[in-house]
Image: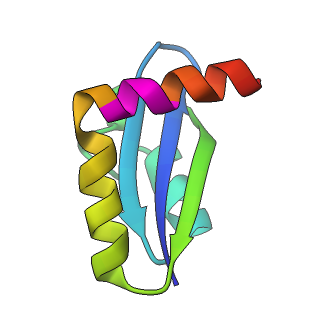
Amino acid sequence: MFFVYMLKSINKNWYYIGLTNNLSKRIKQHNLKKVRSTMAHTPFKLVYSKSFNTRLEARDYEKFLKIRCNKEKLIRNLEYIV
């Protein structure tokens, strides 16, 4: 099982989208500053995740979300829900 996830920095208005096969371990790595691309923005909370059966499906969805307009649309929808 693979997961595409979105993290939100608790202290900043900054979001990160990633892909993993172990979601809880990966979030811990982000919050322990073990991921170079996110260490300046810790701590994080998980705001979205979606599971996939194959890495290819997950990677395609991750790429889709990383397109700016799709990322912004997801953020707006999540803010509306919360």
**Left or right of 1 on screen, residue 78:** right
Q: Main secondary structure of the magenta part?
A: helix
Q: Nearer the viewer, residue 30 or 66?
A: 66
Q: Residue at x 58, y 55 (%)?
A: 49
Give the residue at x 46% y 13%.
Answer: 13
Q: Which residues are magenta?
A: 70-74
Of residues 14 and 62, the one drawn nearer to the viewer in this rendering: 62
21 relative to 24, above or below: below
Which residue is most to the right? 82
How many numbered discs?
0
- Where residue 75 appears, as percent x and y from the top left, is 51, 26
Q: Is residue 30 above or below residue 43?
A: below
Q: Quadrant of the C terminus?
A: top right
Q: Is residue 74 left or right of residue 40?
A: right
| Membership of 71 in magenta stretch | yes
Q: Residue 42, can we see it?
A: no
Between 66 and 44, the one nearer to me in the picture:
66
Q: Where is residue 62 drawn, in percent x and y? A: 32, 56
Q: Position of residue 17 (x, y in %)?
A: 38, 45
For image coordinates 54% across by 20% down, the residue present is 76
Q: Quadrant of residue 50?
A: bottom right
| Residue depicted at x 55% and y 71% | 51
* Coloration mode: rainbow
Question: Does the rendering let one see residue 9?
Answer: yes
* Membership of 2 in magenta stretch: no
The percent coordinates of residue 14 (x first, y second) are 41, 21
Quarter-wise, where is residue 28 in the image?
Answer: bottom right
